[in-house]
Image (tube, rainbow, N blue to C red):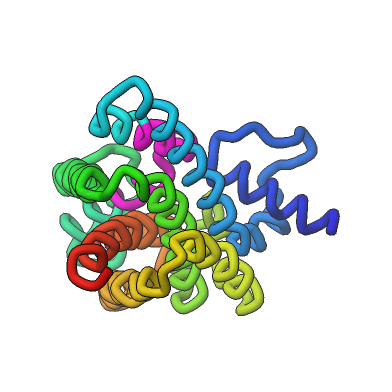
């Protein structure tokens, strides 16, 4: 149990800005196991976004409350996954070989493809949540953050890590993981869906995983696998797909 607590706090330290006990660090031994709690971290991040939205809604409009909520989650994670999505846009938009794509993704500077990509992604995320019934927004935020992180975990499980540099801080967390870790991630990732009390919400898993397969195909074709940035891109895209699919379900099925 003590080891699992250590692994969880390692995941919390690595994926967020949330303060952790001083005895927690980026020890590779624990970091390589931290992906099993990726979805649980998502629940925490989603709850922060939900609380900020709910509290702000008493003072401000839905639009302002959503923007504050999005700011809160991005600040909590340090834009960790948004940065990965932008890097993937830059790398696959401007690179035409494995070496060039990996080099561009490693560059800390934000390019045209990354800027346009992340702006459009955030705009779609905001618009999708704005179109949702206000009552369901907190639930969507919690489920969206947890479930999308589970989807990202499956990418790490199915595709090999391709960077050969040893100086990447994300390498231990992005390398291949055990099936048992994927199962743990699935439990925490899918659990928030039961809050909706409607089995139709589970249909969101199909387009979310399809979006992962779409990106995974491109990753495999161009670079032979995945990196930490690729996992971040999958998380961001599948989160938006979850919100969009939920809207479609409410309109045509529920």
122 is higher (above) or lower (below) than 71: below
Residue 118 falls left or right of residue 17? left
Using the rendered view, name the quadrant where residue 31 is placed. bottom right
Tell me the quadrant of the picture where the N terminus can be found: bottom right
The residue located at (20%, 48%) in the rendering is 131
Instruction: Name the foreground residue: 200 vs 17.
Output: 200
**Which is the main secondary structure of the residues drawn in magenta?**
helix
Tell me the quadrant of the picture where the C terminus can be found: bottom left
Which residue reaches farthest top? 59
The residue located at (27%, 47%) in the rendering is 129
Tell me if I can see residue 163 in this picture: no
Using the rendered view, name the quadrant where residue 138 is placed. top left
Instruction: Name the foreground residue: 126 vs 231.
Output: 126
Using the rendered view, name the quadrant where residue 94 is placed. bottom left
Instruction: Name the foreground residue: 146 vs 50.
Output: 50
Residue 98 falls left or right of residue 144? left
Q: From which residue to which does the magenta span run?
A: 69-87
Q: Position of residue 136 (x, y in %)?
A: 36, 50
The residue located at (71%, 50%) in the rendering is 27
Q: Position of residue 220 (x, y in %)?
A: 33, 76
Q: Position of residue 57 (x, y in %)?
A: 35, 29
Q: Position of residue 217 (x, y in %)?
A: 29, 77
The residue located at (55%, 34%) in the rendering is 17
Residue 16 located within the stretch drawn in magenta: no
Residue 86 located within the stretch drawn in magenta: yes
């Amino acid at each position: 149990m003590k080891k699992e607590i250590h692994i969880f706090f390692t995941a919390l330290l690595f994926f967020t800005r949330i303060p952790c006990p001083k005895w927690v660090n980026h020890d590779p031994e624990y970091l390589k196991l931290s992906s099993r709690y990726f979805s649980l971290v998502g629940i925490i991040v989603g709850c922060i976004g939900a609380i900020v939205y709910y509290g702000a809604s008493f003072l401000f409009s839905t639009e302002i409350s959503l923007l504050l909520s999005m700011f809160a989650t991005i600040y909590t994670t340090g834009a960790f996954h948004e940065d990965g999505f932008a890097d993937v846009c830059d790398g696959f938009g401007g690179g035409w070989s494995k070496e060039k794509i990996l080099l561009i993704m490693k560059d800390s500077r934000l390019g045209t493809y990354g800027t346009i990509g992340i702006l459009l992604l955030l705009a779609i995320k905001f618009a999708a949540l704005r179109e949702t019934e206000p009552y369901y927004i907190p639930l969507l935020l919690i489920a969206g953050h947890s479930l999308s992180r589970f989807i990202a975990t499956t990418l790490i499980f199915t595709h090999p890590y391709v960077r050969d540099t040893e100086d990447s801080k994300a390498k231990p967390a992005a390398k291949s993981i055990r099936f048992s870790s994927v199962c743990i991630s699935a439990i925490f990732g899918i659990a928030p869906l039961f809050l909706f009390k409607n089995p139709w919400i589970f249909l969101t898993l199909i387009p979310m995983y399809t979006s992962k397969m779409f990106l995974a195909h491109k990753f495999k074709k161009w670079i032979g696998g995945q990196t930490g940035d690729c996992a971040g891109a999958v998380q961001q895209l599948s989160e938006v797909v979850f919100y969009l699919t939920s809207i479609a379900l409410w309109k045509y099925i529920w």
